[in-house]
Amino acid sequence: MVEGTWNRVRLSLVLLMGVTASSFAAIFIRLADAPPLVIAAGRLALASLIVAPVGVLRCWPELRALLRRDVLWAIVSGLFLTLHFAFWIASLEHTSVASSVVFVATSPLFVAVASHLFTQDKLSRIMLSGVLLAVLGAMVIGLDDFDLTGTALWGDFLAVLGAAMAAGYFMVGRGLRPKISLLAYVSVVYSIGAAGAVLLVGLTRQPLTGYSTITYVMFILLAIVPQVIGHSSLNWALRHISATAVGVTTLGEPVGSTILACLILMETPSLVKLGGAALILLGVYLSMREEERARGSAVEA
């Protein structure tokens, strides 16, 4: 009983840490004065430089023992990560922080449908209700900023594409994480993601140098806080709960990003956004409670 309670507490704390760290991403990106692909490449390259050497030293036998199929799926996961950042970071140039993180937070819808169709993580009515409620809250947060002009609409569309790529990233991770340790997994995936982003920068002939000091500081912060701490925490959770539950939990990111945008970028949230935040938290609570119930039933069976 005590061990089960501690496991639930640990899972909740790790997810909270992951969402909190990820909430800083949009702020750091807005403060970085560089093209979207360069920001993505800087974030992923620095993150891979942090984790990959440690991963190779500590997990080399595990990495060598990986099946070719698992290596290919890890590459796919890394490419999904590249495209997720490429689309989402680009969206921040065209729309507000709140709208961008709201639309990219629709990834649980893609994850839920794909999980139900292609994996054993079937979607119960309560889980579906939690997903829809949280997504509704995310949409409410962006309601005040939703703009049908060309630029804002394009930014919203890019964020939705980023959400679809994030869904693929979580889905592949859900399949691989039970087979591979966290350090080995992120070492491969972050490195592949970085290589993909750098390749895109090269193909588009965008410079990697010549930016301001503050921009490079933002690259470092992006690598450490939302990537190494935030994404790695969520990837850790994928070994213990479904991709849908992890995806729903990330819907707390618009809440954190909105608060940070208020404090740092002076984007004050309205009562509408606060109401949306409440819906998100309620949706996350329902989904996580259902996930816990399903895990308990599986153990008893």
Image (cartoon, rainbow, N blue to C red):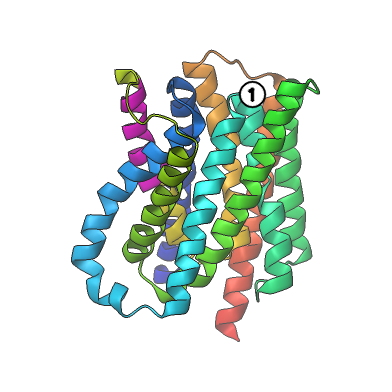
**Residue beneath label 1, please?**
94
Say whether residue 36 is magenta.
no
x and y percent of residue 71 in the render? 42, 71
Main secondary structure type of the part rendered in magenta? helix
Residue 62 seen from this side: yes
Residue 1 seen from this side: no
Nearer to us in this view, 105 or 220: 220
Nearer to us in this view, 56 or 75: 75
> At 37% from the left edge and 58% from the top edge, which residue is drawn?
186
Residue extending furthest top? 266
Say whether residue 221 is magenta.
yes
x and y percent of residue 29 in the render? 47, 28
x and y percent of residue 63 in the render? 31, 72
Q: Type of residue at label 1? A: His
- Which stretch is magenta? 215-229
Q: Quadrant of residue 6?
A: bottom left
> At 55% from the left edge and 59% from the top edge, which residue is drawn?
170
Q: Quadrant of residue 38?
A: top left
> At 42% from the left edge and 60% from the top edge, which residue is drawn?
236
Which SS class for mark 1?
A: loop
Question: Split into 4 quadrants, where in the image is the N terminus?
Answer: bottom left
> At 27% from the left edge and 48% from the top edge, which residue is drawn?
49
**In the depicted structure, whether residue 241 falls above or below residue 265:** below
Figure disc tally:
1
Question: Split into 4 quadrants, where in the image is the C terminus?
Answer: bottom right
x and y percent of residue 78 in the render? 47, 56
Residue extending furthest bottom? 301
User: How many residues crowd mark 1 within 10 Å: few (<14), some (14–19), many (20+)?
Assistant: some
